[in-house]
Amino acid sequence: MKGIIDLTIPQILLAYVFVFVVLFIVRARGIKREREILLSSVRMTLQLILTGYVLIYIFENPHPLITIAIILLMEGFAIGTVFQKFKGKLSRKLKRVIALSMSAGTLCCLFYFLLAVVQISPWYDPQYFVPIAGMIVGNSMTGVSLGIKSLTEGMTMQKNLVEEALVLGATPKTATRDIINNTFDGAIMPTINSMLGMGIVFLPGMMTGQILSGIAPTTAIAYQIAIMLGILGSVSLSVILMLVLGYRTFFNEQDQMVDS
Amino acid sequence: MFEFRDVLYKDILDLPDLEIQAGIVTTLVGPSGSGKSTILRLLNKMTSPTSGKIFFEGKDLAEIPSVEHRRSVAMLTQSPAMFSGTVGDNLLAGFRFQQRPLPEETELQETLYNVHLNKSLASSAMELSGGEKQRLALGRVLLMDATVFLFDEPSSALDEDTERFVIERLTGQAKEKGKTIVLVTHSKAVAETYSDEIVEIAGGKVKGRK
């Protein structure tokens, strides 16, 4: 392990040249972003070094409780990130729906993926659990974020259409059908698009990493295919759960629209 | 048919006692902002009172399922939204939302005639003028098999001749079929010619009845 770090330090230092290039560009053009660029570079470096050591510890001391703690931390962080992004725009009920649908959607897919597809043993093997959970939770978080944005915008911008539908005798479910379908479509499109370009336009990160570490490309590809399908499933499941439970939070028990 | 008891709605309406009778045309008149539209929304249960009770055929409105109620008490809003698609799609919107069997095309044509809208069923709803959209929305509501019809300024975007034609058909047909109509209008002429009862609303209160 130490040998590899020694080998890469000069290369890492060379890579920081890119940061200086960006700093030079923003300074020359008078764009006030130096602070953020420096901060993000330093934070990324420190966070990853820390994560590296944490992972070493976890891999050497696998324990179900540690794995559970990690997945809870990931879910909590992902849900918190969504809340933070839409600060002040989400009702309490909608927040509860987001937390529930993200946890249920990702955990179902994650456990199916690990236990039925990859068939890891023991079930908490952190070498598989942690990176795969990261990919599934991270992608679902992006999907749910997109979904929330489009759902809240749809309910605001098309409020008159939803109201008109209610006036004409629609149930809230029927009245919001189009908004929900469009939102679902929009939220899974990035995943679908990345599947379309995969292998031709770009080589995905996990596959690249496995190939760099010396694993046969065929094995790397098999993993990549499986994880992409797992991500598609988890994004779709989290988003649709969020939508079918979430639309109701825009209505009261008398099937009237709630003023936001 | 409708009975208001000690109804307060925010600081907009204060109706300790208001009754709307079945089978007649009741018109609500009064300055804009006096709460007429809110009364219609309460009748249709798009809104509920802050306090007090409204009874519909003797039953507390709060106890009646809202969607079911809106299907028997149809409402034309003041600025109705158009759904994307054709004139025909918009006429059928209510049927689709209520998942009811669709009517024959002749019935749709007849509705267009009744609301004085000379357009084909296949023309785009988005390209209609303001007045045409309003008449299309009126037609959409009239096609509903409701017992009560609430019309919020059905003729505000119509010229006088069209207004007379449309309101006459509206009230005439409703009376024939024993429907109840509650109409909100700015037009004194419309109120006086076609109503059985006129309720004057000002500042959220009933100021008088004729």
Image (tube, coloured by chain):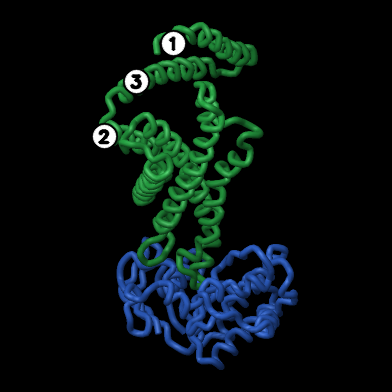
Residue type for callout 1: Ile
User: Quadrant location of residue B7?
Assistant: bottom left
Q: Is residue B179 above or below residue B208?
A: below
Label 3 SS: helix
Residue B154 at x, y percent in the picture: 59, 74
Image location of residue B138, percent across then percent down: 60, 75
Asked whether the beta carbons under mark 1 and mark 2 sit within 8 Å of each other, the answer is no
Q: Is residue A254 left or right of residue B93?
A: left
Name the residue tied to disc 3: A56
Q: Which mark is residue A5?
A: 1
Local crowd size for mark 1, using a 10 Å CA cut-off: few (<14), some (14–19), many (≥20): few
Query: According to the rendering, which colour does chain A have?
Result: green
Left or right of residue A135: residue B9: left
Instruction: Check disc 1 and report its element: helix, strand or loop.
Output: helix
Quarter residue A71 falls in: top left
Of pointers 1 and 2, the one earlier in the residue sequence:
1
Determine the residue positioned at 54% across, 19% down. A33
Q: Chain of mark 1?
A: A
The residue located at (46%, 49%) in the rendering is A239
Q: Chain of mark 3?
A: A
Please tell me the colour of chain B: blue
Q: Earlier in the sequence, mark 2 or mark 3?
A: 3
Q: Amino acid at mark 2?
A: Pro
Q: Any mark on residue A221, and which?
A: none
The correct choice, above or below, for A5 with respect to B71 in the image is above
> Could you classify mark 2 by the number of other residues whose Cα lies within 10 Å: few (under 14), some (14-19), or many (20 or more)?
few
Which residue matches tag 2? A64
Mark 1 to mark 3 CA distance (whole Å): 13 Å
Q: Secondary structure at mark 2?
A: helix
Q: Quadrant of the N terminus of chain A?
A: top left
Q: Is residue A55 left or right of residue A180?
A: left
Classed neighbour count for the residue bearing mark 3: other residues with Cα under 10 Å, few (<14), some (14–19), many (≥20): few
